[in-house]
Amino acid sequence: MSLAQQAVAEVAAAHEYFVRSTRNLTEAHSTFAPVPEMMTAAQQVAHAAQTIDWFIEGAFRPEGFDMNFDEHIRVANAVTSLAAARAWFEKAVAAAKTALAAKSDAELMTPLPPGPIMGGLPRMAIIGAITDHTAHHRGALTVYARLNHTVPPMPYMDM
């Protein structure tokens, strides 16, 4: 199995776990946040999608990662619909899988640009970061579900 195939498989698994874990959240939960300062359910999903796009773009463009986090937060926080956020998540995952599938092992092992985001590590390192980041947000969203008296599904098997 090539590195690209491994990367696509890992992104696909992270996608599946995220979708399973959060499928019991409905559009009615879109604007739910445990406290006003926290992201809403829709913003959590939007941020997860945005970060997949951010990792793929940053790993493979010459200038590296876009560090304008204030703008990233503004864009994710503008999302108010869970359906819209989920559509973005699906699009981000599909784009990531397409981009990664087209990469050679050499491209995936090329070091990331110097800098504070995994500087010098192989580009392939973004896959673990995508997996960890989506796991973090699916975990937060399962707490949101429980706060809404909903038991989140088990992420690792379809029941």
Image (spheres, helix red, strand yellow):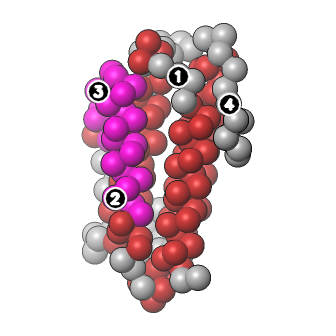
Give how far apart the Cα atoms at labels 3 and 1 are: 19 Å
x and y, in percent, of residue 157 in the image: 71, 44
Give how far apart the Cα atoms at labels 2 and 1 are: 24 Å
Q: Earlier in the sequence, mark 2 or mark 1?
A: 1
Mark sitting on residue 78: 3
Mark sitting on residue 153: 4
Q: Secondary structure at mark 2?
A: helix
Span of residues in magenta: 72-97
Looking at the image, do the residues carrying marks 4 and 1 touch, with CB atoms under 8 Å apart? no
Q: Which residue is mark 2?
A: 95
Which mark is nearer the camera, 3 or 4? 4
Give the answer, above or below, for where 91 lies relative to 155. below
Q: Is residue 83 left or right of residue 41?
A: left
Give how far apart the Cα atoms at labels 2 and 4 are: 26 Å
Instruction: Give neighbour class at mark 3: few <14, some 14-19, many 20+ (Cα, 10 Å).
Output: few
Asked whether 146 falls inside the magenta stretch, the response is no
Looking at the rendered structure, the kind of residue marked 4 is: Pro
Looking at the rendered structure, the kind of residue marked 3 is: Ala
Asked whether 92 falls inside the magenta stretch, the response is yes
Give how far apart the Cα atoms at labels 3 and 4 are: 28 Å
Instruction: Give neighbour class at mark 4: few <14, some 14-19, many 20+ (Cα, 10 Å).
Output: some
